[in-house]
Amino acid sequence: MTRETPCADTLVQVSESHPIILFDGVCNLCNASVQWIIRRDTREVFRFAALQSEAGSRVLSRAGGNAQLAENLSSMIVIDQGRVLTKSDAAIAIASRLGAPWRWAKVGRLIPRFARDWVYSVIARNRYRLFGKQEACMMPTPALRARFLDAQEQA
């Protein structure tokens, strides 16, 4: 059994002033999660890119994310305030930047990371079987295009 090294403390040299969410662009659960975040991100804090896109790979590389993360699409990755966050740390970081009641998810940090990440990993490992998979990454609407770093690739 291999143990993934958490990347929560990897420093980032990305000039983007908004937190960036990198996600599996063909995963139905991931796409639904991005849509859920967009609807609740009324201040338009987050920017998005599919991990499969050139923009997503470029951002992850500049952030110091390792190749193992790029090959293993089982985690949303958040690049925020100089850190690369994965799994439950990423989910908590996203929720904490949204309005109430979602920002109260910060109390989830009281649960040990190994327990939070175990639950996240079980869902992530089964996401294609449970929620399905698309043939291609989602296309943002014209109104959302500026929030997607990889929108030009999809045009």
Image: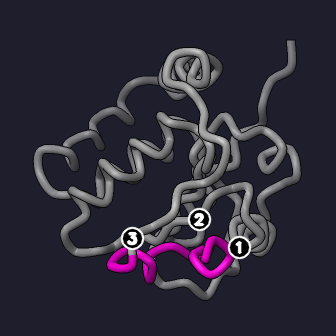
> Vertical placement of 67 versus 125: above or below?
below
Seen from the viewer's position, the closer of residues 64 and 31 is 31
Of the two numbered discs 2 and 1 on the same chain, state the one appearing first in sequence. 2
Q: Are marks 3 and 1 in contact (CB under 8 Å)?
A: no
Residue 8, percent from left and from top: 62, 50
Magenta part of the chain: 142-155
Label number found at residue 141: 3
Q: Are marks 2 and 1 in contact (CB under 8 Å)?
A: yes
How far across and how far down the image is residue 124, in percent? 59, 26
Number of residues whose C-alpha sits closer than 10 Å to that of mark 1, classed few (under 14), some (14–19) or many (20 or more) = many
Distance between the alpha carbons at the discs numbered 2 and 1 = 7 Å
Q: Residue at x 51, y 73 (%)?
A: 148
Residue behind mark 1: 55
Q: In terms of depth relative to the viewer, which is nearer, 101 or 46?
A: 46
Answer whether residue 126 is magenta in the image: no
Residue 151 in the magenta stretch? The answer is yes
Where is residue 11? Give x, y as percent: 69, 68
> Where residue 36 appears, x then y in whole percent?
30, 48
Left or right: 43, with 143 as reference point: left
Instruction: Pick out the residue farthest to the left.
Output: 100
When asked about the image quadrant of residue 44, the answer is: bottom left
